[in-house]
Image: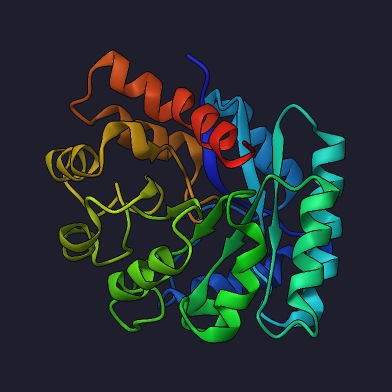
C-alpha cells in the first residue's frame, strides 16, 4: 500500500540541530526522536515504507520566508517523487500578497502555518489578507490546538472558513494538539481536513478511530510530524486503529490525491 505523509519538517543541515532543539523546548522540553535533516527524513521514509511526503518548515520571522522556501523547493527538486513542497508564509512580510502569488507561481503545493510558534491569531486581519490569494488554489496546513494558547482555536478556524469558504484547510494533529476531543466537538462538520500527526501517541486507538470517523474518513490524512516522531513508530500506532482496509487506504494514500486535485481545480 502506498503511503503519503502530510506532516514532515525539514531543515538545512547547518541549523537542523538548533531548530529541532527549539521545537522541543516549545513543546515543554519534549524529547525529539529525529534530527530534522532532509537525508534523515528520506531514510526514515524508506524504513517505514512511506512513498511521498509534504515537507515544510515554519518561518518564525518574515525574513526567513524566502530562505525556507528556497530550501524546501531545492529538496523537492532533489527528490521530485518523494517531496511535495509546502511553502512558509508570515503575516509580517512587507507584501504578503505578492509573496503568496510568487509561491503559487513557483509550483508549491501548499502552505504550512503554525500560529502558536509564529505568534499570531489565525483569523487576525493581516493573516486573512495573507490567506486570500490561496483560496481555491493551494491548501493550507495549519497547526491546530494547544491548551496554552487560543491562536488556532475552533472559533478562529470557523471564522477563517466563513471568510474564505473555498479555502482548503488541513487542521493538523486531528484538529487540536492536546485538545483533540474538545476541538473535535466544535470542528466536526466543518469543511476541513485533518491529519493524524502528534495525536496517536496520546489517544487510545478507540478514541482516535472515533475522532477520525467523526470528521469523516475521507477527510483524514496520515501524518507523522517528523522529527518529533519517527515514521516507523507513528505507523505502528496507526496500525493499531480499528479501521477497515478501505479506510486505511483512503487515509494513507487516496485522500491526499483528492485534496490536491480539488485544491488545484
Q: Is residue 90 visible?
A: yes
In this image, 249 relative to 147: left or right?
Answer: right
In this image, 79 relative to 207: left or right?
Answer: right
State the residue at coordinates (64%, 58%): 134
State the residue at coordinates (17%, 59%): 181
Instruction: Decide which of 63, 51 is in the foreground and name it.
Output: 63
In this image, 264 relative to 244: left or right?
Answer: right
Instruction: Decide which of 75, 48 is in the foreground and name it.
Output: 75
Instruction: Decide which of 182, 57 is in the foreground and name it.
Output: 182
State the residue at coordinates (29%, 46%): 200
Q: Which corner quadrant of the image does residue 46 belong to?
A: top right
Seen in the picture, residue 12 relative to 214 is either above or below; the reply is below
Seen in the picture, residue 201 relative to 183 is either above or below; the reply is above
State the residue at coordinates (74%, 76%): 96
Q: How many marks?
A: 0
Q: Is residue 12 visible?
A: no
Quarter that holds the C terminus: top right
Instruction: Decide which of 66, 259 is in the foreground and name it.
Output: 259
Q: Position of residue 249 (x, y in %)?
A: 39, 19
Amino acid at each position: 500500500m502506498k503511503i503519503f505523509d502530510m506532516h514532515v519538517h525539514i531543515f538545512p543541515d547547518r541549523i537542523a540541530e538548533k531548530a529541532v532543539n527549539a521545537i522541543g523546548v516549545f513543546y515543554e522540553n519534549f524529547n525529539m526522536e529525529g534530527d530534522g535533516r532532509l537525508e534523515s527524513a528520506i531514510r526514515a521514509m524508506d524504513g517505514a515504507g512511506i512513498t511521498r511526503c509534504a515537507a515544510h518548515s515554519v518561518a518564525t520571522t518574515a525574513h526567513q520566508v524566502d530562505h525556507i522556501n528556497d530550501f524546501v523547493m531545492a529538496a523537492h527538486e532533489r527528490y521530485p517523487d518523494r517531496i511535495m513542497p509546502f511553502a512558509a508564509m508570515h503575516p509580517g512580510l512587507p507584501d504578503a500578497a505578492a509573496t503568496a502569488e510568487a509561491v503559487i507561481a513557483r509550483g508549491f503545493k501548499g502552505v504550512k502555518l503554525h500560529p502558536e510558534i509564529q505568534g499570531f491569531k489565525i483569523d487576525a486581519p493581516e493573516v486573512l489578507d495573507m490567506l486570500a490569494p490561496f483560496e481555491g488554489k493551494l491548501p493550507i496546513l495549519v497547526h491546530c490546538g494547544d491548551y496554552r494558547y487560543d491562536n488556532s482555536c475552533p472559533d478562529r478556524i470557523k471564522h477563517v472558513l466563513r471568510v474564505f469558504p473555498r479555502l482548503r484547510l488541513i487542521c493538523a494533529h486531528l484538529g487540536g494538539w492536546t485538545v483533540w476531543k474538545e476541538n473535535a466537538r466544535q470542528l466536526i462538520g466543518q469543511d476541513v481536513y485533518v491529519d493524524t500527526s502528534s495525536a496517536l501517541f496520546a489517544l487510545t486507538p478507540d478514541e482516535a478511530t472515533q475522532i477520525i470517523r467523526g470528521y469523516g474518513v475521507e477527510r483524514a490524512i496520515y501524518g507523522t510530524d517528523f522529527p518529533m516522531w519517527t515514521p516507523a513508530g507513528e505507523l505502528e500506532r496507526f496500525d493499531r486503529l480499528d479501521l477497515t482496509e478501505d479506510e486505511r487506504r483512503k487515509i494513507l494514500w487516496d485522500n491526499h490525491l483528492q485534496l490536491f486535485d480539488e485544491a488545484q481545480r
